[in-house]
Image (cartoon, coloured by chain):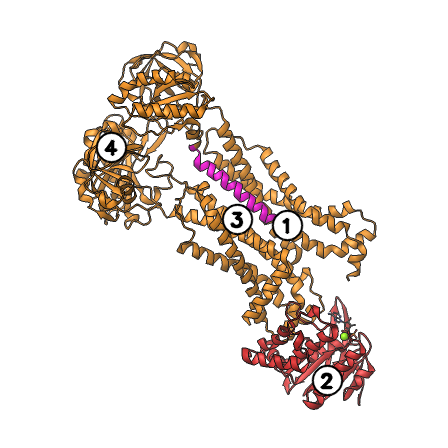
Amino acid sequence: MLSLKNISKYYKAGNLKTSILNNINLDVDAGEFVSIMGPSGSGKSTLLNIIGMLDEPTDGYHYFLNQPIHQLKEKQRQALYKENIGFVFQAYHLIDELTVYENIETPLLYHNIKSDERKALVADMLDRFQIVGKKDLFPSQLSGGQQQLVGIARALIVSPKLLLADEPTGNLNSKQGDEIMELFKKLNKEEGMTIIQVTHSEKNAEYGSRIINLLDGTVESSKNV
Amino acid sequence: MLKNYFKIAWRNIKRHKAYSAINVAGLAIGVAACLLIFVVVQFELSYEKFQPNYKNIYRIVLQQDLGDGISYSEGTPYPITAALRADFPQVKLAALNTAYNSQFTVPANANNFGADNKKFVEEIGVMFMQPQFFDIFKYKWLSGDASVLNAPNMVVVDRSTAKKYFGDWQSATGRVIKMDNQINLKVAGVIEDVPGNSDLPLKVLVSYATLKTHLHEYNADDSWNTVSSNHQVFMLLPANATVSNLNAQLKVFTKKHYGGNDNDHKVHFLQALSDLHYNTRFGNSLGDHITNKATIRTLSLIAVLIILMASINFINLSTAQSVGRSKEVGIRKVLGSSRAQLIKQSLGETTLIVLFALLIAIAIAKLALPFLKNIASVPDDISLFSIGSLLFLLTTTLVIVLISGIYPALVVSGFRPVLALKNKITAASVGGVPLRRVLVVAQFSISQLLIIGTIVAVRQMNYINSADLGFNKEAILVIPGSTDSVSLQKSAPFKAQLLQTPGVKNVTFTADQPSSQNNWTTNFYFDHNTTDKNYQTSLKFGDADYFKTFGLRFKAGHAYTQSDTTNGVVINETFAQKVGVHDYNSIIGKSVKLGNGQWRPIVGVVEDFKTNTMRDAVRPIVLVQNKKQQGIVAVKLSTSNFAGTVASVQKQWEHTYSDYAYSGYFLDQNIAEFYKQENQLALVYKIFAMIAVFISCLGLYGLVSFMVVQRTKEVGVRKVLGASVSSIVYLFSKEFMLLITISFIIATPIAYYMMNSWLQNFVFRIPLSVGVFVLAIVSSMLVAWLTVGYKAVKAALATPVKSLRSE
Ligand SMILES: Nc1ncnc2c1ncn2[C@@H]1O[C@H](COP(=O)(O)OP(=O)(O)OP(=O)(O)O)[C@@H](O)[C@H]1O
Ligand SMILES: [Mg+2]
């Protein structure tokens, strides 16, 4: 599904060139559940953002669904991203001015989905995450765990083939974290959704089928669970 | 999608109430002000445009050199019409002679004049009119047609006059009315009311043929030497002719018909109809007022400046706020929004706010519309909405949305999602402070320009209103009357009767008050010289009590003794100076001959008084008595029981001159009316300076709030390092003091130029002193301080720990 070849990322500050990612090679097949681990500052988020096309590598080849991302124009990349990738963040990143319902609905608007269908899809999601009762509340009125549920619901509503999660449980207590992990596992097993998550927790990493360890911008180890 | 944008926009507006209020209020007030000015300017520029022949109609006017410089007159001598028709047979032309303040007596029923007559005085709109006028100008006839004006003693009225006189226009035709108690006229036609945007208010049109037997009563004279501005000739430019062509022919025409001195000193030429409403060279308008093009330009400029300021505010505040929105933008990008969609959203929000502001603006304008006549001469029923004003609103909206929406939209949509999500977007990356500084300087330049304008205009008008006119204008009731022989016979007994009335101090019969916009001039001879002076003197007629009543002060000699005809004359200082006499006592006893009159001794010299308006220099003047000219009675009243005395005088007047309608006025109010347009302009400056200051304060407040947020950390660090509160307040105030000073440097020369040229309209004017400018900058600083002082002090007083922890 996804292939990174010799991906590198540098930041230039004056004459100083800091290397964040160094010759990363990574292949992820459809249906995999990959956990990325590593110390703070090792480049996990940067790698995930590159996979998710939110950031561009300085060097290297990036293939997604057999398309050479590094050669695509902004517009085409945008379209590919929109159709296939869902993002979940540690800080939830909900739109504060929108209700739960509207937050979940927003991606559908960008996918030009008709109003009736939108209603049905959102209602489905609300049901599935058991947050029907919260649909008219604003993010500030929810607990962290609930906010993350909304964030995940929002990422899933367009049925992405690839779900990217950057420390999805980082701000949650362990019970809430477990629930989210169970949910990921279920999505992966039952729906065959490809998931790549960044995590600091060994326990959460174990939910995945493969664990990749980053150190100073290189893949230090990769093992199947 | 759209709904989603609007929802967010609405919630954003609600969430940032103060910010939204500032934004909307600034824009709404700016747009409302502009809309009102637009309505005025559009009205002023629309004069006469409804005439189908608008582009080809001309007035034949006169340029003359009477010895004291070239002057212009819209008037023509009475015989010119026949001569023009003979010399220019191919040209359609028509003469009219207007009569100001004519009285019409309407019998209550049928055509029998009786005790229950109704009397109407028409200030303007009464004209002796040739039927050919209607070949040139087009109006709708409700009844009759132009041909009815061929015969003498016929009259055509407009719809509202017909309604006023007879109840409705249908019953007007065939009725008989009496003009100025002498001329019986038969109503032979009714025309539709002329629109307000015309200098030809046709209310009562008397057939021109009627004038022939009443020339003297209407200041006309069958002579080429007499030019009355009331007698005007209009023509339609023939298809094959050009203006320069006709002007050349008119030169030849002038040479052919004028005799003597006039032959060299007068020449007729064409003035376009499109110039009529704006050219102040040609004194009084037949209509309500003339508007200088410069005034229209000033108004338009003010409108443009105000809308500019409001837009600047909007851009300023919008971009500042967009920083706070960067996270939302990042999320939306992650959720699949394209850049175009983000731009659309940002524009959508701007549009929403602008539309919202627009609605409020329209409401404000609607509420303010009735007061518009205080700042401009517009009709009471002027409408806010026209194709023009709607177009104006539409363009304004578009322009504001584009300039104030596109910029923030582009900036915001260009945020990189990763950075946006990390809240790494700072003010610096959205244009930041330098741009904002430029915008604030622009705003303050505009406000200071208007503040200076206000100070100068208000001072000048105060100066005019309180200036010593050289006579006493207080508590003087002036009642215009007739000079027909019956009325004149009543003068002496009426005067005696009035003087018996308690509260009446003095009474004089006169032809003209000391300060007026009239100009009665004649050539004259001095000290038995056989050739006349090469300049003219002005005349004022009044009986011997004229000086006492108006409180004129004698420099030498005394008033003439009461008589029905001229015996001695009184001159003013300017007259004495002009004929070369500086010792006023020595001119007493010398003689003056006015026109073709007799030699009369000078018996007194009065201190110069303002003979016309403050716009004009004091003219050399000769005061004489001549009962035949003195139809106006001026009554000096005591201030105790003022209202009672006025009522009593009015009652006595109406009883004595029962055929006439009473139209008394107070001299001081009448003189104030001279400056109606200037007072209006001063008010415009006042109002718009206030709006400008208000808007720029909003802008400044926005800027400082922005700076405070940006520099919170800096302030925190400085405080930790031991900075005092006052030094931190200084940190903020230094900035805007500097900005205001820069604005002042920009505004001053422009304001100086503008107001100096405005003051040139007045011969009597205030100097443009340094104080005016100092006042402008000091008041700007003060207002700015009041606006931002609070914010600055608050920022300075904040606990440093708080601001440092936020990072
Ligand atoms: N815009 C940037 N400019 C310069 N350096 C950056 C930028 N963004 C990230 N970095 C650096 O890149 C390195 C990797 O950052 P990244 O966010 O990928 O780390 P991470 O592994 O996700 O760490 P954490 O576990 O703390 O989230 C860090 O050292 C960071 O300082
Ligand atoms: Mg990270």
Q: Tell me which segment is drawn in magenta.
A: B673-698
Could you tell me residue A2's position as x and y percent? 68, 86
Q: Which mark is residue B305?
A: 3
Q: Which mark is residue B700?
A: 1
> What's the residue at 49%, 56% (across, down)?
B396
Q: Which residue is mark 4?
A: B179
Q: Quadrant of the image for the C terminus of chain B?
A: bottom right
Q: Amino acid at mark 1?
A: Leu
Q: Nearer the viewer, mark 2 or mark 1?
A: 2
Q: Secondary structure at mark 1?
A: helix
Question: Mark 1 or 4 closer to N-term?
Answer: 4
Q: Is B71 situated above or below A65? A: above
In the rendered view, does B176 fall on the left or right side of B716?
left
Question: Is residue B751 part of the magenta span, yes or no?
Answer: no
Q: Nearer the viewer, mark 2 or mark 3?
A: 2
Query: How far, Cα to Cα, is label 2 from label 4?
Result: 102 Å
Q: Secondary structure at mark 4?
A: strand
Q: Decide if ligand 2 comes within 8 Å of the CB at mark 2.
A: no
Q: Decide if ligand 1 comes within 8 Å of the CB at mark 1.
A: no
